[in-house]
Image (cartoon, rainbow, N blue to C red):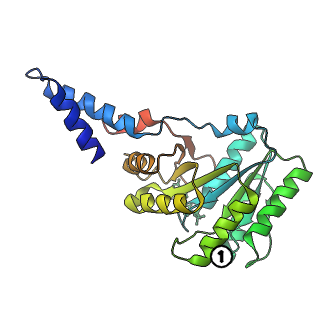
Amino acid sequence: DRIKSELKRELTRHSIERGKDQEIIQQNLKKSIEKLFKQTKYDLVTTIKNSKHKPYTVIFFGINGAGKTTSIAKVAAKLKQSHISCILVAADTWRSAAIAQLEQQGNKIGIKVIKHQYGSDPTAVAYDGVKYAEAHNIDAVLIDTAGRQHNNLNLVQQMEKIVRVIKPNLKIFVGESTTGNDCIEQAKKFDEVVGIDAIILSKADIDERGGAAISISYVIDKPIIYLGMGQKVDDLKEFKKEEIIQSLGL
Ligand code: GDP
């Protein structure tokens, strides 16, 4: 709707030379889409390197299966490559498999995982993670959380508590780009509860045209920092709006 109204305004503002209509429409369409993206570029590596906060805490939210654990491992591998030390925290104590899965990812990339038992208080695990990082001079803490359903009150309360106590430096929403409008609705709900700072869109290798990227960025008005481009730890790409616009043939 936003694209349509903007196009209409632009196209009715001046008269269009005969034969130039297609070119002008394309140019204006490109401009309208460009404007939908949050302008601020977010470079996580530089942000952590320049931050006064040590450890720099990043917490990841998103529903089960969205690619949260995989994305955390990808970000951790990227930080490691950039000589930023980090640990992972298994604060998804809701699903027994989640702790094991994060541990597996940590082992794969050679990064320590802080965990408690299944069913324990997620905030307590996150707190331990931060204390461990402080004691060991670690640069960053990446915290996994349970895949919340926004209508589950208990989980929502836990999510609010972890943010209130830990006061993370960055709250990332991980959404699956292939789910289109669902992904946008989820992002809105998470934003309402915890206040999202940035987005990682996973499975962008499946949704190559990037429709979800355009809508999500506009609707929740937060920068997309990375695109997940596959299942391997190095399948993480910095988000560039120019590439999305190009993939639309504009
Ligand atoms: P979580 O439940 O949110 O932690 O989701 P997982 O990280 O376990 O991911 C769910 C599934 O999606 C796994 O099979 C992952 O390998 C897969 N996956 C995650 N990210 C990507 C991606 O960027 N591209 C593709 N093709 N698959 C992905």
- Residue 120 shown left or right of residue 174 in the figure: right
Q: Residue at x 14, y 23 (%)?
A: 20
Where is residue 118? Give x, y as percent.
Answer: 74, 77
- Looking at this view, name the residue that lies furthest to the right: 135
Q: Residue at x 49, y 54 (%)?
A: 203
Residue type at numbered disc 1: Arg
- Residue 91 shown left or right of residue 178 in the figure: right
Query: Across the whole image, how many numbered discs are drawn on residues?
Result: 1
The crowding category of the residue bearing disc 1, from other C-alpha atoms within 10 Å (few below 14, some 14 to 19, many at least 20), is some
Q: Residue at x 32, y 31 (%)?
A: 31
Q: Height in image: 135 above or below 15?
A: below
Where is residue 178? Give x, y as percent.
Answer: 42, 57
Q: Is residue 232 visible?
A: no
Where is residue 58? Give x, y as percent.
Answer: 69, 52
Kindly state the secondary structure of the residue where label 1 is placed.
loop
Q: Residue at x 68, y 69 (%)?
A: 92
- Looking at this view, name the residue that lies furthest to the left: 18
Image quadrant holding the C terminus, namely: top left
Q: Which residue is denoted by mark 1 in the rendering?
A: 95
Camera-side residue of 244 and 131: 131
Where is residue 108? Give x, y as percent.
Answer: 73, 56
Q: Quadrant of residue 115?
A: bottom right
Q: Height in image: 76 above or below 48?
A: below
- Residue 164 shown left or right of residue 212 in the figure: right
> Within the displayed image, which quadrant is ligand 1 positioned in?
bottom right
Camera-side residue of 33 and 11: 11
- Residue 107 shown left or right of residue 7 in the figure: right
